[in-house]
Image (cartoon, rainbow, N blue to C red):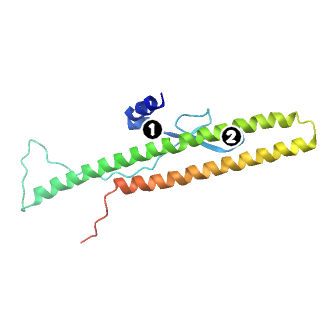
Amino acid sequence: MRALLMLLLLLLPASAFAQVYKCKGKSGETMYSEHPCDARAEPMKLREHSVPAPVAAPVASEPTVSTEPGQASESASAAAANSELEANRAAERTCIANATASVYGPSNDRVSTLQQQMTMLGEQLANAPDAQRSQALRTRMATFRQAITREHGNAHTQMTTARQRCLELHRPAQTPAR
């Protein structure tokens, strides 16, 4: 079943993973999800790149006039380079979107489980028979809050690493200027 789900996710177009929502949990913690958590969920923008202006191609009805040898080939190579750059940027955005889904999805699931456990502890705290039991519940809730904070930090660290890896994979090495 899990393999089928992963296969379906891989078959979805990249745009399906392109949106990430920032949400506030019941305890005020920040969560990230592919789907809006509630009406207050804020869509986040993934890294956007400015797109260079396309190289003007000659109109088909007009003959290409080359006043210097190599001018037409320079224009064609510039168009090819621009096309390759756009393909690399699209691959980079897809890579980042997939990394976002694979990092924040499981992280949000773990945070949700911790929040559910905190809710149950809160209900137990409201009905605690004595101060000793109340203190033990508060201590356990503090431990869960720390775990949620660590989970968020780990997810952010993993995403930073994943973004860097996507940049390295899909950005051509800069060539020194002549």
Asked whether the viewer can see residue 91, the reply is yes
Q: In front of the other: label 2 or label 1? A: 2
Residue bearing mark 1: 17
- The residue at the point 72 percent across, 37 percent down is 117
Direction right: furthest residue? 130
- The residue at the point 39 percent across, 38 percent down is 14
- The residue at the point 31 percent across, 58 percent down is 172
Relative to the observer, which residue lies in front, 46 or 56?
Answer: 46
The answer to whether 64 appears left or right of 18 in the picture is left
- The spot of residue 44 in percent (x, y) is 52, 44
- The residue at the point 35 percent across, 49 percent down is 89
Q: Which mark is residue 114?
A: 2
The answer to whether 56 appears left or right of 149 in the picture is left
- The spot of residue 115 in percent (x, y) is 69, 38
Asked whether the viewer can see residue 22, the reply is no
| Disc 2 to disc 1, C-alpha distance | 25 Å
- The spot of residue 111 in percent (x, y) is 64, 41
